[in-house]
Amino acid sequence: MTDERFGKCPYFTAQSVLQGKWSILILHFLSDGTLRFNELLKMMPNMTHATLSKQLKKLENDSLIIRKEYPQIPPKVEYSLSNIGKEFLPVLDSFKTWGKQYIQYMEKTDH
């Protein structure tokens, strides 16, 4: 990263690492355990193959997930949370709690 705030400001760092429309959802699905590419793709039917591939590469480059490739035919690749990715699980739980509260709030109010 070229921005001087990266690595110094925790909010900017978190936002930079978690950017992407699907990153939090991918981390959520991987919180239940290791998944293959096509399993993830089936869980997110509105996502294209290329988008998932790009998002997984970014999460891997940011050290949040681990990509394990098996030398076999047909190719087998699995994705799982890294140790620092697992440290994000309490944050995911907080997002879930807040998301539910927000949904309830929006259902009760005129917006």
Image (cartoon, rainbow, N blue to C red):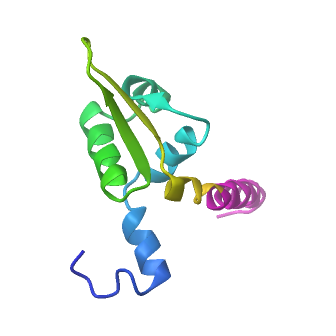
Q: Residue at x 42, y 36 (%)?
A: 79
Q: Magenta-highlighted stretch: main secondary structure?
A: helix
Q: Closer to the camera, 61 or 101?
A: 61
> Residue 31 appears in which quarter of the rendering?
top right
Q: Tell me where the magenta segment starts and ends, as one range.
A: 90-111
| 99 inside magenta stretch | yes
Any part of residue 22 in sight: no
Left/right placement of residue 48 relative to residue 98 reads left
**Residue at image coords 51%, 47%:** 27
Q: Quadrant of residue 74?
A: top left
Determine if the magenta segment contains residue 93: yes
Q: Residue at 39% x, 65% y: name it.
A: 17
Which quarter of the image is occupied by the C terminus? bottom right
9 vs 67: above or below: below
Left or right: residue 41 compared with residue 97: left
Front in this rendered view, residue 57 or 50 = 57
- What is the x, y in percent for residue 55? 33, 47
In the rendered image, the vertical position of residue 67 relative to residue 98, given as above or below: above
Residue 51: x, y in percent? 28, 41
